Structure formats: structure tokens, C-alpha cells
DNA sequence: CTGTTAGCGCTTTCAG
DNA sequence: CTGAAAGCGCTAACAG
């Protein structure tokens, strides 16, 4: 890799570095057609590539945004990233990627690093949106995605969890269920979870916690057995009543289906079921499962769209929550 | 954003920029404890952050690697990215992310841009590993992942497609199937697909194409109906023989299951089935589906590991294909 | 222990 | 139309 510089090119072409620089930047007005052709020739012959860092330094141009992802392995998240990238591409920003692998500490490290590397802006899909680290970020150049802080200090764009669950559970209600249950991982104060539950409550008006069923998240075998036992109890209590379950997400749904299968119950005969999130496999179940389709891609896009506005228009604004609507996919699972 | 520079800090502390620079780089040997404390104070008071670009330029230190992803939305791929990132983090490289969204042209643009931005190395998960763009890449500082070119010119790390399919199909053979079929998207000369088929052939020794069933990829409704018709024919031809299907990936499996369901057949009674790829939902099918688990994470890790070796040891090497083993997950689906 | 100064590679006035 | 030269913000000899 012969470290060619603009100087070398200038010598070869018998012009000054300024001319080469102009050529590189498409300012052809300032040179004869001849030197232009000559330069073109030399540069493509030598495969010269101007040093990107030097260039950035000289024009103090920083079009890079940092992305901090809680867990890139989550299919929802990779859709979001896809949306972010697509917009970055449009707006000619490059994206510096980091992944926290669900660790709060890594998240902090990543954000700190991004700050040190002087990115123009940051989009963060937080492990913990209430982490103190976010107080070191300015709303001027960052936006959050998916999970929202209890006190909004950063613009965030998220799915409309509450409304969409409320609507789907309303649909279930119309089918005259005697008892509806909300199946979820432990809340742990995570906004996506609690909001979905709120939607459930808003639709059902239940006033006790009796209709809440917890599934272990990364539990031991024993805990799953306990969960199955809980389901068994519920089913026994509802032998002559119509019972339905709303699952907080697909993984929870899988656990429920597993338990039901093990207990010998099947939907929609023995129970009704619907879920947050949509995956391919729900379509090939018999019958397909009613669900809520999130527009994760659009969340990513919107986030970058907002960030860009803030970056380029420099206007101050109150931290705002932008909710992205979902879509109901109805089948005969309840 | 008070554009503070090292110079400002130097003035405030009544020292030279050199001292500040030394402080910033942890060279405390060259200064009194007093000025060190003083500097520490001033820098944290002013929240001064040295300009990253200038720093890189000055030390000509380029620890960034570019990643070109064919489709980040693919769950397999996001595992790979996760592995790449984890290693980058270890080795203190930052990662510049790009996504081609399955477009060959975008892939070319992305790689070109990464090159122009002067990344130290590139890891690419190609849309088309035979694209001419890869001839402009040096094996010295790039590695490919997942799909492999027909003529290897770049180190690549991929799943051991052939061997793993052969082994799983061998398992099927042991169950005395009369006829086995390979269900796949059109090959289109894509290495992952053809290699899996080769594994199938190696295990079965079939010499005709009669055992190959194509599923449309992004087809119209009519094409899927045609596919279902094909399956119907196969099932009719095998009413008194034991028939099994191996699916090239999960999406293909879903199509097969859909067709079978529509036709009123169920496994393992009417047919046997196994597939490449593993997803959560395969566990809750009745019975769970036997499959091949790829270690995508490890592919990403390995890719970055190799890249780093090349980058830091500068040794020339022949382009090499590194195959990552898989794991058989056996259930009673065949 | 601390300061001077010449770069790093490119951009950009401002003269010619 | 072209070139000289002064930066961009930081680093790293080299002096003192």
C-alpha cells in the first residue's frame, strides 16, 4: 500500500496540492480541462484514495452517528437497525455500531465510547432506559428507541404498546370470554411490559392481579414446571367457563403453547389465545394465531429522521414521545 | 458545545499543549503530580473531550473495521454481527456498519464507501459472493462470511453445510425411508443452497433430479399453489411407501408444513421431516422438529479473529475456507 | 519535569 | 486558471 498523498499526486501532475484537492472535491471550474483529464488519469492509475481522517479534520465535517443496541440478536431490534441504517444512508451519515448484549455495564461503556469518539449524534435502544448514563446525553443529539424512560429526558420513539393491546383484547372481549389472562415475563419495571399490561387492564377493567400469569424468563426447569402447574390450575378452575390468554410476546406465547400441549389442551377449543409480536411460524399453526404486528422498521426510520432534524436545524425542543402504530392480524385462535 | 481545544486547556493550566497531550495519553511520568491534578480538575470541570479525528490523524491510528451485511433482518445474520462485534470490542476496533438489504448494487456501493472511508479491514456477508467488486478487495484486509465465492479469493468462514446435511440425512436413512426429498428455494448458484443439496446427494446417492422439490422464494400466490400441487403428487405417489423431506431452511420448512396441513397430511405419521436451521418455534411443534443448529455467533467471532491476525501480523496467506461445525438436534419428526 | 515545534493529509482563502 | 500558505486539533521528537 504505497502511502500516496495528495502531494505525490500533485507532483506527478505538475500542479499544486490545491488543484488536486479541488479536483477531488469536484470543483472543476478552477482548472483547465486538460489538467482535469490528466488528474483523472493519474488518480485512477495510482488508485489513489484521499485520507478520510485528514479530510474530516480539515473540513470539520462529522457525519457519523453512533448506535447503541441492547441486543442485536433480537429480531425486533435488527428491524429497527435496518430502518436506522436506511435513513442514515439517505442522509449520508455513516453508522458506528455497538451492541450491549443486554448488559447494563456494556451499554454504559458503549455510550461513553461513542461520546469520546465524537459522533454527531446517538441513537440508543437501551437495556435500561433509566440508567444514569442518559443524563450525560443531551436531547439535542440523541434519540431513544423502543423502551422509554420513566421520566422522559430524551426524545424517544416506540411502539404504541398500550393502545394496540387494548384494541386486540377488546376483540377478545367481543367473543364473550368469562376470564382473560395476561401472560408475561416478570415486569421488572420495563416499560414495554407494563404498558402492554395497562392496555390489557384498560380493556378488561380487572381490578386485581388475579389475571396476571408470570412466565420465568431465564429460568430453571423447575420454574417452568411451576408455570405449567399454574396453567393447569387455571384451566381446572375454568372447566365450564370460556377462558382466553393474551401473551406479552412471542417467547411467552411459545411457553404457554408448550405448557398447554403438555397438559393436553388445544386452542381454540379449550382456550383462546392471542399475542403481541408476529413471526412467520404463527401462520402455520392450526389455526394461525392472532397477533399484533409492530412496525419496527418504521421505528428505526423515524428515530433517525428526528435525530437528523435536531442535528441540522439545531432547534431546542422538549423531549417528546413518538408512538408508532401497530397492525392487528386476526385469525381464529380465539 | 464550547469548542474547546487542547490549547485552551493548556492556557488554563499554564502549561504547554504537549503536557496536556501527555496527560490525555496517560504519560504521567513527564509531569509533576501537581500539574497532573490540576489538569485533571480542569478537564473534568470543562468536560473537555479531545477531538477524535485530529487524534487519529496525528497518530495515523486506524482501528476501525467496516462491516457489509447482506440483510441484517435475517436472524442468522444478526447473530453473526453479534459475534463480530464482540471480538471487535475485545480487540479495540470500532465497527462501521452497512446493510445491503439484499441488493447487489447497494452492496457494491457500501463496500466502495467503506474503502473510501479508509477502514483498516472489511468483513462482508455478501449478497453475491461472486460480484466483481470483491476483486477490488485485498485478501490482506478482508474476510467473507456465510456465502462463499465459487473461486475463493478471500478468506471466508462459513457453516459446514455439506457435512451437516449429510449427517442428518444419514440419520433419516437409518429409519428406512423409501423416498427422501430435498425441498429448497431455487439454487441460483448460491453456495449455501447447492452445498446443502450436495450433502443430501452424498447421503442418499440419488442420481437424478427427481428428488428435488423447488419452493418459490418471493413468488405469487399461484406459484405456491403449484408447489402445493407438487407435494400432493408426491404424497399420492408414495401412499404405500415411507416418505421423508429435508428442508433447506426454516422458511422452506414453513411452506412445506403449510402445504401439508392444507392437504391434510401430518408428520410423523404421513411423512418424515427435518430441516436446516433452528428456531424457537420448532420446539413447540408436535412433535418438535429435528434440525441442524448453526453456530452463527462463532462464525462472526472467527471472522474477526482471522481479520485481526491478518491486520496485525501482516503475513500473506492463501485464501482459506474455514468451516464451522454444526450441531444435530434430534426429535421425533422423522 | 516542561515547552517548542514540526508534522499527520487535506481544505481553503487569497494572491498572482 | 493555478499556487502558496495558513490552518484543522493533536502527537511526538527534541531541547532545555
Image (spheres, coloured by chain):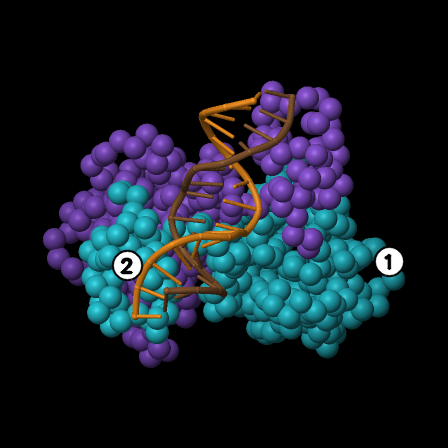
Chain colours: A cyan, B purple, C brown, D orange
Nearest the viewer among B328 and A15 is A15
On screen, residue A325 versus residue B321, left or right, reads: right
Nearer-the-camera pick, B1 or A128: B1
Q: Is residue A35 left or right of residue A234?
A: left
Q: Which residue is at a point 26% across and 45% down the rendered structure image? A: B138
**Residue A134 at x, y = what percent?**
72, 50
Q: Circle 2 sits in a helix, a strand or a loop, which is it? A: loop
Q: Along the polypeptide, which appears first: circle 2 or circle 1?
A: 2
Chain letter for mark 1: A
* Residue A189 vertical placement versus A206 (above, below): above
Q: Nearer the viewer, mark 2 or mark 1?
A: 2
Depth check, front residue: C6 or C7: C6
Reading the image, the residue beneath label 2 is: A15
Give the residue drawn at x 32%, y 35%. Answer: B310
Image location of residue A286, percent across then percent down? 51, 65
Q: Quadrant of the C terminus of chain A?
A: bottom right
Outermost residue toward the right in this view = A207
Instruction: Please state the horizontal and vertical placement of residue B219, each as a whole percent of the image.
Output: 34, 73
**Which residue does the numbered mark 1 point to in the structure image?**
A208
Q: CA distance from mark 2 to mark 1?
A: 82 Å
Q: Are marks 2 and 1 on the same chain?
A: yes
Crowd tier of the residue under label 1, counting other residues whose Cα lies within 10 Å: few below 14, some 14–19, many 20 or above: few
Between A211 and B324, the one nearer to me in the picture: B324
- Asked if residue A301 lies left or right of residue C15, the reply is right
- Above or below, comparing residue D7 to residue A312 in the picture: above
Q: Position of residue A38 (x, y in %)?
A: 21, 63
Amino acid at each position: 500500500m504505497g502511502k500516496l498523498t495528495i502531494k505525490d499526486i500533485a507532483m506527478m501532475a505538475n500542479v499544486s496540492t490545491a488543484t488536486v484537492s479541488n479536483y477531488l472535491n469536484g470543483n472543476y471550474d478552477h482548472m483547465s480541462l486538460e489538467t482535469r483529464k490528466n488528474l483523472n488519469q493519474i488518480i485512477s492509475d495510482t488508485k489513489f484514495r484521499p485520507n478520510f481522517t485528514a479530510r474530516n479534520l480539515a473540513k470539520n465535517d462529522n457525519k457519523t452517528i453512533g448506535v447503541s443496541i441492547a441486543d442485536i440478536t433480537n429480531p425486533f431490534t435488527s428491524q429497527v437497525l435496518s430502518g436506522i441504517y436506511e435513513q442514515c444512508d439517505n442522509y449520508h451519515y455513516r453508522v458506528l455500531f455497538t451492541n450491549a448484549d443486554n448488559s447494563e455495564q456494556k451499554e454504559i461503556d458503549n455510550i461513553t465510547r461513542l461520546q469520546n469518539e465524537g459522533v454527531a449524534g446517538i441513537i440508543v435502544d437501551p437495556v435500561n432506559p433509566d440508567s444514569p448514563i442518559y443524563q450525560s446525553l443531551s436531547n439535542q443529539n440523541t434519540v431513544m428507541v423502543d423502551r422509554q424512560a420513566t421520566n422522559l429526558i430524551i426524545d424517544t420513539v416506540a411502539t404504541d404498546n398500550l393502545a394496540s393491546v387494548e384494541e386486540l383484547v377488546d376483540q377478545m372481549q367481543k367473543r364473550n370470554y368469562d376470564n382473560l389472562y395476561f401472560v408475561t415475563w416478570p415486569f421488572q419495571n420495563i416499560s414495554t411490559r407494563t404498558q402492554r399490561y395497562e392496555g390489557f387492564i384498560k380493556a378488561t377493567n380487572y381490578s386485581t392481579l388475579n389475571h396476571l400469569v408470570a412466565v420465568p424468563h431465564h429460568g430453571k426447569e423447575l420454574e417452568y414446571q411451576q408455570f405449567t402447574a399454574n396453567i393447569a390450575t387455571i384451566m381446572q378452575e375454568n372447566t365450564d367457563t370460556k377462558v382466553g390468554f393474551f401473551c406479552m410476546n412471542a417467547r411467552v406465547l411459545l411457553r404457554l403453547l408448550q405448557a398447554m400441549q403438555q397438559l393436553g389442551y388445544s386452542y381454540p377449543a379449550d382456550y383462546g389465545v392471542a399475542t403481541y409480536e408476529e413471526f412467520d411460524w404463527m401462520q402455520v399453526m392450526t389455526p394461525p394465531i392472532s397477533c399484533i404486528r409492530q412496525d419496527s422498521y418504521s421505528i428505526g426510520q423515524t428515530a433517525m429522521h428526528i435525530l437528523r432534524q435536531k442535528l441540522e436545524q439545531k432547534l431546542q425542543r422538549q423531549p417528546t414521545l413518538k408512538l408508532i402504530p401497530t397492525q392487528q392480524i386476526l385469525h381464529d385462535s380465539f
